Image (tube, rainbow, N blue to C red):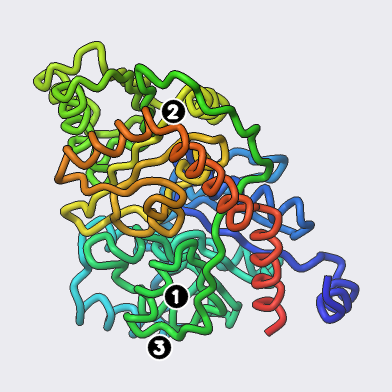
Amino acid sequence: MPLRGYLLASLDSKPPHIALLFTTFPKNSETFLQRDVAALQAKGLNLKLYSLWGGGGEFRGLPVQNFPKWRLIPLLLFIFPWNCVRRPRLVRDLFEGVLTRSAPSWLNFWENMLGAGFAGRFAWQLQQDPPALVHGAWAGAPATAGWVFWRMFGWPYSTGAHAYDIYEHGGDWWLREKLQHARFIHTSTEAGRRELIERGVAPEKIICIRRGLDTFPAFKPLRANRRPLRLLSIARFVPKKGLEHQLRIYAALKAAGLAYEARIVGAGPLRGKLEDLAFKLGLGGDVKFLGHQPQPEVWAQLAWADVLLHTGVVAPSGDRDGLPNVIPEAMAAGVLVVTSPTSATTEAISQKRTGLVADVDFPPAWVIALRRLGEDDKLAATLRTAARRWVEENYDAHQNTARLVECFQKAMEA
């Protein structure tokens, strides 16, 4: 701990802590946030975890306090009217924002209201042991709560800003205000950083720190005979994953006579639609939908696969992927990767250096790419070696978390 932090801690019986705010924590589809918490905990930071919607329980011995929605009742009846008297400027600014601009969606509107509601309801509780820093894992509801706490008490706050926060329906409703006053903004891709700079966020505030692996898996040998080619996809069944395109790619492979087996790991609202499309395309026994799988089984599927397919697209809402964790995981394990060029996936997959890139709207390009990976041992070996090297240099959780810890410490001391 830096000297100043040590002296402050010695004057108070309670050591300084960071309040980590999540939308839902822990959540199966957001393992990267669980890794962040585990890594920060391992670095010795004093953490208190709050989940604004769902979640709760315990994580690695840390209680996760959730926000029972019934607590909004006393907020509306007593706390909000009291703050209208006590903090009229804050309430005025909130109403001015609501009345002078339209939220990009009702969901984003209520996400921000949830964050404000959480701050109003938990203000008294957090005042009993004020955090040295409030960090919102997302720039939606969690960052709104951090911003409100800053307005109420002057507590410093920081926030993550991920693809959903930046792109969904054009970005979060209150994004400009929240990022303007945050001590730092954590993105995990250079694409996200560039987008925020283009929107006027001060470059020095935006820190690109990638996620990471705690331990690197064994680098499996290249399968000598890759016929049939073992294809794997790990994705939520939502529009931005482009899984309808992926099924059409499988149909093109079948029409081209390329022998393969395909497995899709994941769950989500589009599953029924995708299964119907697979049936219509005659993919029957060629493609297996395995549903959601726990992390150990995900690694088992990567051990089985020759190639990971990522067919990300820009969804109608504007949402898109950053760099999904499964891509560096596959690269680390020795699984070849073919990806679409959408968003930040090409920060890891460089054409013919660490993997192959193909347009999802042109299935023949995928047929050519996958045929090459199935037949060209020299190319496959070169790509796998370079991919593993990229992950070791860029996706080491210990190195990346050390940078994040430094950001937290500087934010608490500023």
Q: Are marks 2 and 3 in contact (CB under 8 Å)?
A: no
Is residue 170 depicted above or below 313 in this figure? Answer: below
User: Residue 89's mark?
Assistant: 3
Quick one: which residue is furthest to the bottom in this view? Answer: 89
Looking at the picture, does residue 308 appear above or below residue 112? Answer: above
Q: Circle 1 sits on which residue?
A: 82
The relative height of residue 107 versus residue 62 in the rendered view (above or below) is: below
Amino acid type, mark 2: Asp
The amino acid marked with disc number 1 is Trp
Q: SS class of the residue under badge 1? A: helix
**Which residue is nearer to you in this view: 59 or 380?**
380
Q: Which picture quadrant has residue 261? A: top left
Q: Residues within 10 Å of mark 1 (few under 14, many from 20)?
A: few
Neighbours of disc 2 within 10 Å: few (<14), some (14-19), many (20+): many
Residue 230 in the image: state x and y as whole percent. 38, 23
Q: From the image, which quarter does the N terminus lie in?
A: bottom right
Residue drawn at x 26%, y 47% as measured from the top left = 358
Between the C-alphas of marks 3 and 1, the distance is 13 Å
* Contact, mark 3 vs mark 1 (Cβ under 8 Å): no
